Amino acid sequence: MNDNFLKACRGEKTSPVPVWFMRQAGRYLPEYQKVRGNHDFLTLCKTPELAAEVTIQPIDILGVDAAILFSDILIPLEAMGAGLSFEEGRGPVLEPPVRSRDDFRKLHSIDPVSDVPFVLETIRILRKELEGRVPLIGFSGAPFTLASYLIEGGTTKSFLNIKKMMYGAPDLFASIMDLITEVTISYLNAQIEAGAQAVQVFDTWAGILPRAEYSVHALPYVKRIMQALSDAGVPRIYFVYDGGHLMDLIKQAGSEVMGLDWRTDISMAVRHLGSDIVVQGNLDPCAMFLPEDRLREKIAAILEMGREARGHIFNLGHGVLPEIPPEKVKLAVDIAHELSS
Ligand code: 1CP
């Protein structure tokens, strides 16, 4: 049983340092493309045998130290009554967007057992198939990130609609955030009950907020989630993309592990927050395009900084890019293991 990942989450030094990558299952893998060629993305997420198959692909191919459930952060939004589709080349579409009290009334809380049974079944299959080889990570989106998709109706660059509501109708915004928070707590608890051995909360868009707004409109909800899960007995990871300016606030969320994107030096995080933090990250995904010797230097530098923290889980600063050759991704895993053994 390889439990280096769980040990590192608890702040124990491990040799080698555990490695997994955000989006380790996905388009860069021909094996994924093969399965995906026969099924659309949502069908893949909702068919436990297929979701389990693509979850395990990177474990076999890359030799990473943790599996992450194959699903998407937007799945519970659909269960809450939002219309969800993935359009080729356009990304996710949530229609109609939630912009008014009336729109909000159409959303409802969920019972994960009856509303997203496929997620829980995928987890149960995975625990059986993994047979303790590596731990399984469950996940959710963070409320601000999920609210941005609901209110914008999809991906956005300006965040105009969510900001309009945040500033102009703060009570409605808070109602939406409260509901998402409640759903996320029951969703993650259900994943843990089904067998998830750690959970990661992805806050991909909270980094667009200045500190004052993040403190009021995003952080309290994540804190509530972390508190609600504190007795569940599994490590909690909180990843904020582009959150360097929020570092001390992110720490207040109360997760065991802080995920850093590639912009923030681990050393800087240790300097600001103290050496008792456990960090996850944070190689620039584009570094995988470097020749081997340069890639090795980049990985060595990150491992070196990771030693300053109480615990370190090696990861990318964001997801694996679809353009990266799988051999390079495997090489990065091997180098990180070799240099930390
Ligand atoms: O066409 C395809 O094959 C779908 C591509 C794809 C994949 C492989 C999407 C669509 N989602 C996923 C899987 C996924 N998404 C995982 C699986 C586990 C793993 O890491 O291997 C996870 C954890 C996510 C989480 C997710 N989905 C996030 C948070 C993490 C991040 O990348 O910042 C976000 C923002 C999404 C939304 C999403 N899902 C998919 C797309 C194209 C998007 C849009 C991103 C955007 O708005 O720009």
Image (spheres, helix red, strand yellow):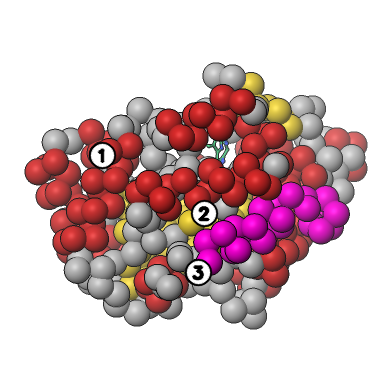
Instruction: Give the mark nearer the N terminus: 1 vs 3.
Output: 3
Which of the four quarters of the rendered structure image does ligand 1 lie in? top right
Q: Residue at x 29, y 66 (%)?
A: 17
Q: Which residue is mark 2?
A: 68
Q: Residue at x 52, y 54 (%)?
A: 68
Quick check: is 110 in the magenta stretch? yes
Q: Residue at x 69, y 65 (%)?
A: 194
Ligand 1 near label 2 (Cβ, under 8 Å)?
Answer: yes
**Which kind of residue does numbered mark 3 sit on?**
Gly
Which range of residues does the magenta coloring cover?
109-131
Q: Quadrant of residue 153?
A: top right
Q: Which residue is mark 3?
A: 132
Position of residue 174 measured from the top left corner of the image (x, y, whole percent): 74, 52
**Circle 1 — which element?**
helix
**Which kind of residue does numbered mark 2 sit on?**
Ile
Out of 127 and 111, give the one closest to the viewer.
Answer: 127
**Is residue 177 visible to us here?**
no
Instruction: Give the mark nearer the N terminus: 2 vs 3.
Output: 2
Could you tell me which quadrant the N terminus lies in? bottom left
**Circle 2 — which element?**
strand
Quick check: is 188 in the magenta stretch? no
Horizontal arrangement in the rendering, residue 153 relative to residue 211 (left or right): right
Q: Residue at x 16, y 61 (%)?
A: 339
Distance of label 2 from label 1 (alpha carbons): 20 Å
**Which kind of residue does numbered mark 1 sit on?**
Lys
Could you tell me which quadrant the C terminus lies in? bottom left
Q: Is residue 332 above or below residue 28?
A: below
Specify the principal SS of the magenta part: helix
Q: Which residue is mark 1?
A: 328
